[in-house]
Amino acid sequence: MSKEQKRTELYELGEFRLIERLIGSFDASQKDTIKGVGDDAAVISCGNSDCMVVTTDLLLEGIHFDLTYFPLKHLGYKSVVVNLSDIYAMNAKPGQITVSIGVSKRFSVEELDELYAGIKLACERYGVDLVGGDTSSSMTGLTISVTAIGRAKADEIVYRSGAKINDLICVTGNLGAAYMGLQLLEREKRIFQSNNAAQPKLEGYDYILERILKPEARAGVIDKIRELGVKPTSMIDISDGLSSELLHICKNSNVGCRIYMEKIPIDEQTAKMASEFNIEPIVAALNGGEDYELLFTVPLSGFQAIDGLDGVHIIGHVVDAMLGAYLVPPTGEDIQITAQGWNALRKE
Amino acid sequence: MSKEQKRTELYELGEFRLIERLIGSFDASQKDTIKGVGDDAAVISCGNSDCMVVTTDLLLEGIHFDLTYFPLKHLGYKSVVVNLSDIYAMNAKPGQITVSIGVSKRFSVEELDELYAGIKLACERYGVDLVGGDTSSSMTGLTISVTAIGRAKADEIVYRSGAKINDLICVTGNLGAAYMGLQLLEREKRIFQSNNAAQPKLEGYDYILERILKPEARAGVIDKIRELGVKPTSMIDISDGLSSELLHICKNSNVGCRIYMEKIPIDEQTAKMASEFNIEPIVAALNGGEDYELLFTVPLSGFQAIDGLDGVHIIGHVVDAMLGAYLVPPTGEDIQITAQGWNALRKE
């Protein structure tokens, strides 16, 4: 055995194994902590029938956003929305946010005005209050940390862990659009960098650009489903790609799944841009990430209510864990689902 | 008028005016938001007699800590404690935290183990649960964002705004120690940088070093005072220096104050190190920052209970706002109190 101190690189573990290693040994001691790490948001009892749900996200310049094409107002809006999406994914309603920023002196007050105009717009649109935060200089670039707080009745909260065999698997909206929007922006950036006179070609792709630059959280869908008498058995928001989120639900619910390729909703612009990049649209939908759609399961008895509901797509069903998680193509063999979504600790 | 777009530098406004500009126009729309921005923590109603209090802090490498002398385990511990201090300053009890980190690949998994060992130690010592967070790579250095959530009965929460004329002004512990500990560490770093063979001279200063590297939050003091039948009328934690915090209480409570120079508690090591640096110890106590002691006011009727209480010092009293905020030296003229504490948006 070497006596040298061991050095393990972060990418060797990847995000999920790293988190497990760092906080796996932490105990929960507070009796009002109903759910800690491991879902879209933590759940804390209010002491009555209500719970608070809490989620937080850290957005770092150069990792999560590139200011060469990301307008600051959009960035402010998005940094709020991605947190609200986690609150909705618990079947809760967001009420408050805190926003902390670290800014290098490269930024002017007027630029921060833009960032906060976007934050304010999101607060107004989703009916949440900005209740705190922290403002600091940074040595480098822009750092944004948002925490969102929501509320729900304890018995209405939906976790990742409740999916049952034969449940239907549903997604809202469509998938892969944000990923293809990002590819388009990155391509035009490269072209501009090699030729400063080049004008970016973005026409006809406004929808996929909006999906990456100004996403919305699925605020109303679950309300609509509730009105139809259906409650999801499990739910998660799609931030790292459908594959990754499906595997979270399968693991946490101890089930498997079958997803039908032709049922996965993909927008026309997503498909068109994917073909420009010689990517199969289904790959963008499965692994793209940043969709902020909701993935949820409902009992089979909810089929009539859900089927044909605007903005909701039934893409498959839950099976026994022993049967694994597979994508079923129109012809040919089933394809095992693996998480190839965004890795926040990738090597390069 | 120039048609050029105006560019205002961040340091021109400073932290408090910048925050006012960025979020001054935000409205609170949620009826459960009891207190938003402007105190040590936000206060959200639970819908019964309880409230949740929420605070957040962003710690950035090179701005808030220097890893050349800051052990990662201590940093983890401190990043939790500084948030808990804000919860105690509301007269609430912390219950949960979330921790987000951004790390560059300069860091190994083993180094993050150290950071989280410190976070865990703080969680255990203060009885709080880690319930969430976010882990990401960063382009540069280490970013830590902690949010703490606490709980209190609505009628027990103490704001910055409740100080009344004739109230006694009290502080816990002693002041200026963390600042002098920081000066010592910075001096030894400079010496080491000019001569790599130099050994740091830190003997005899363990207390002030602990105050900067591993501070504690004042968890028990307010309980003790409550047991004596006294409730603070206003409270704040001392993170930016006594002067700055006094002015917050005066402004929020619309009062003035008189503080007696010889009453301000200063540890022996603080005084000794200050003399090595040719700094008046009182200056370190007034403007030093990072003390994480509690500054609070109590009604004059509480004098008997508070006077002589271990770890609590009566340093002055509240006066009419028209009389201003002044430091009273043993001899000579009163000195107006001005905020010269730490400016998170300083120019250099």
Image (cartoon, coloured by chain):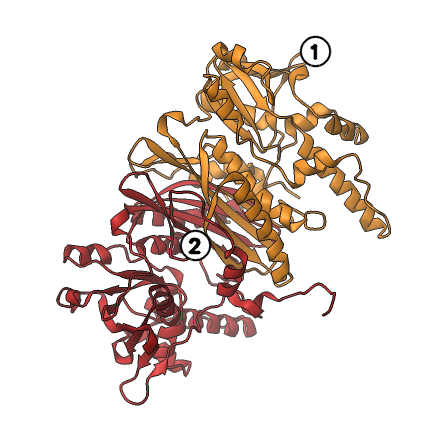
Chain colours: A orange, B red
Residue B12 is at least partly visible in this image: yes
* Whole-percent x, y for residue A46 in the image: 32, 37
Residue B91 position (above or below residue A239): below
Q: Quadrant of the C terminus of chain B?
A: bottom right
Amino acid type of disc 1?
Pro
Tag 2 and tag 1 share a subunit: no
**In the foreground, B348 or B25:** B25
Which chain is home to disc 1?
A: A
Residue A34 screen position, x and y as percent: 35, 33
Q: Which residue is mark 1?
A: A330
Foreground disc of the pair 2, 1: 2
How far across and down, in percent of the image, does residue A345 sit? Answer: 59, 41
Q: Nearer the viewer, residue A39 or A298?
A: A298
The image quadrant that residue A176 belongs to is: top right
Q: Nearer the viewer, residue B61 or A302?
A: A302
Crowd band around label 2 with a 10 angstrom C-alpha radius: few (<14), some (14–19), many (20+) = many
Residue at 40%, 61% in the rendered image: B213
Image mark for residue B37: 2
- Calculate the distance from the C-alpha at mark 2 to the C-alpha at mark 1: 55 Å
| Residue A319 makes an appearance in the image | no
Tell me the element at label 2. loop
Circle number at residue B327:
none
Q: Residue at x 82, y 45 (%)?
A: A191
Going by the image, does A112 lie left or right of B293? right
Secondary structure found at label 1:
loop
How many numbered marks have been drawn onto this rendered protein structure?
2
Tell which subunit mark 2 falls on. Answer: B
